[in-house]
Image (tube, coloured by chain):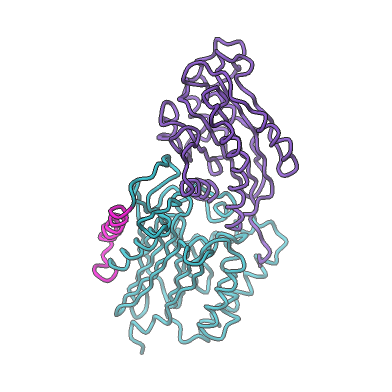
Amino acid sequence: MASNYKITYNVDMVFCIDCTGSMENIIEIVKNNALNFYQDVTSAMEKKHKHISQLRVRIVAFRDYLTDGKDAMLVTDFFKLPQETEEFEKTVRSLNADGGGDDAEDGLEALAYAIKSKWDTEGMKKRQVIVVWTDAPSHILGYGKESENYPNGMASDMKELSAWWGSVEHPGFMDNNAKRLLLFAPDAPDWNVISENWDGVLHFPSEAGKGLENLEYEEIINTISNSIV
Amino acid sequence: MKNANQELNSIFYVAEEMVNDNGEDCFYHDVIDNKFIIASLDGCGGSGSKRYKNFSGKTGAYVASRAVCGGVKAWFLESNEEEDLPTYVQDALSVCKKYADKAGRIMGSLSKAFPTTAAIITGNILRDKCEITCYWAGDSRCYMLDAKGLHQLTEDDLDGQDAMSNLTNDGVMNNSINASTSFEIHSKKIVVGYPCILLTATDGCFGYLNSPMEFEYLLTDSLVKSKNITEWKIALNERMNTVTGDDYTLCVAVCGFADFEDIRNSFVKRNEYVAEKYLNSQQDVNDLWDIYKKNYSLYL
């Protein structure tokens, strides 16, 4: 019998963090949220006897291609935790709020980078979690493509980005059973479009998680960590 | 000669919660004349993790399984007509919505109001057979165990291909009873011969094992090592408690046996066979599943 049998999870998380000037007064809160989030999810899973055999976390820090040029997108590889905790924390701590130009930012490009991460495809069970923290609406995809730093091969519009996210009928770049998207973002375009139309999404409509109550945070952590929609 | 209702030997449940007073499972079993019901419900802890101050700070999942279970009980006692069940369930959900706190701020497809699964078997006990109807939504299951083995009677509302892939792939649930979106309570009528054991189970009973074969072995091995129903209940509880990582609820209706010795003896050979053929084999578990699932899926 399977008395010593343990279901194990490989968990990948990508944190997309708005680092524009308007985030100045809350960037430290967001950085702390990012540093605590993976620990809170993993401990919630452990409480449910869901044992994590591998945990990796990646950072995508975003601004505005037209305004910030080469500083518009900082993308790291996955950090393996706990082995690379120091490097991961150092990277998060180094983020600063600056630039950004107009109200909207290039958050959808950051989300596109996150979706195309090199997700772990091994392991008994998987979790692939993207978390977005922003206080701004998003530009439409391609808004900044006049910038010489704008990436080649980016999703051309929301329809293509939705295909990258995928659905039961048409899987995208992520495992349809494992994927979760958590938005700490305003109830504004195009975050609200994603919230209403994509599978596996949890949207807390506020400025990057500001004003989040304990009960709401517990609800988010439990929703992300529990297995079934 | 026995009366029809004497064909129901025993009806019982085995249940445990991971955190005291916060378990999200619920159950109901009852017998009226020659009709019986067993029902296991599992509030969906992920999509229903919102806590409601108006419900003593309990989660939507906790409230949903209990409220819907109450609706199922009222339906069985007052109607027991297949077409009425959705109305009783919707009425229960309406009460939840009516007394719930104002809607929370969290949006998105992962969050649902008062979501729960349900696996229900109602039976009409006749002298030589039992007419059963299975009702279900979500990933809780109805089963029948007879001398030929364990048979899953209901199809999981999961995106996975079968019971084995649903164990390993962590499939997304595509249908659950809830107060936010439309849902379907599936139903299926089956006539079963005696003797047999009917079961309803939440995923905490079977979802933490290596394979469906191990769940059958858990059921039969605990049975053949027991001397009476009480010992079997205790053994079932101990074994599920050892392997699970979730609340679990198993409701059991034992039909058409002469006595406990007859129940036990009916599964001795099958238990030995499953142990030898499937559990102690060196073959790949997926190859073994391919063999096992023909009989296991007979009613799907």
Q: Which residue is drawn at 64% across and 24% down?
A: A74
Frontmost residue, B156 versus B176: B176
Residue B282: image location, x then y, percent? 73, 61
In the visual, does A162 lie left or right of B164? left
Residue A42: image location, x then y, percent? 61, 49
In the visual, does B283 lie left or right of A133? right
Q: Does B182 sit above or below residue B213? A: above
In the visual, does B85 lie left or right of A148? left
Frontmost residue, A164 versus B25: B25
Extreme residue toward the right, this view: A83
Task: State whether the magenta stretch is mostly helix, strand or loop.
Answer: helix
Extreme residue toward the bottom, this view: B1
Residue B103: image location, x then y, percent? 35, 45
Q: Residue at x 43, y 50 (%)?
A: B50
Q: Chain B shown in which color? A: cyan
Q: Residue at x 57, y 57 (%)?
A: A48
Q: Chain A shown in which color? A: purple
Q: Does A105 sit above or below residue A33? A: above
Number of marks? 0
Residue A89: image location, x then y, percent? 69, 37
Residue A99 visible: yes
Residue B181 visible: no
- Pick the quarter of the image with the N terminus of chain A: bottom right
Q: Is residue B92 magenta?
A: yes
Quadrant for residue A92, please give it: top right
Q: Does the magenta stretch include residue A27?
A: no
Q: Does A4 sit above or below residue A89? A: below
Residue range highlighted in magenta: B76-100
In the visual, does B36 lie left or right of A86? left
Frontmost residue, B136 versus B16: B16
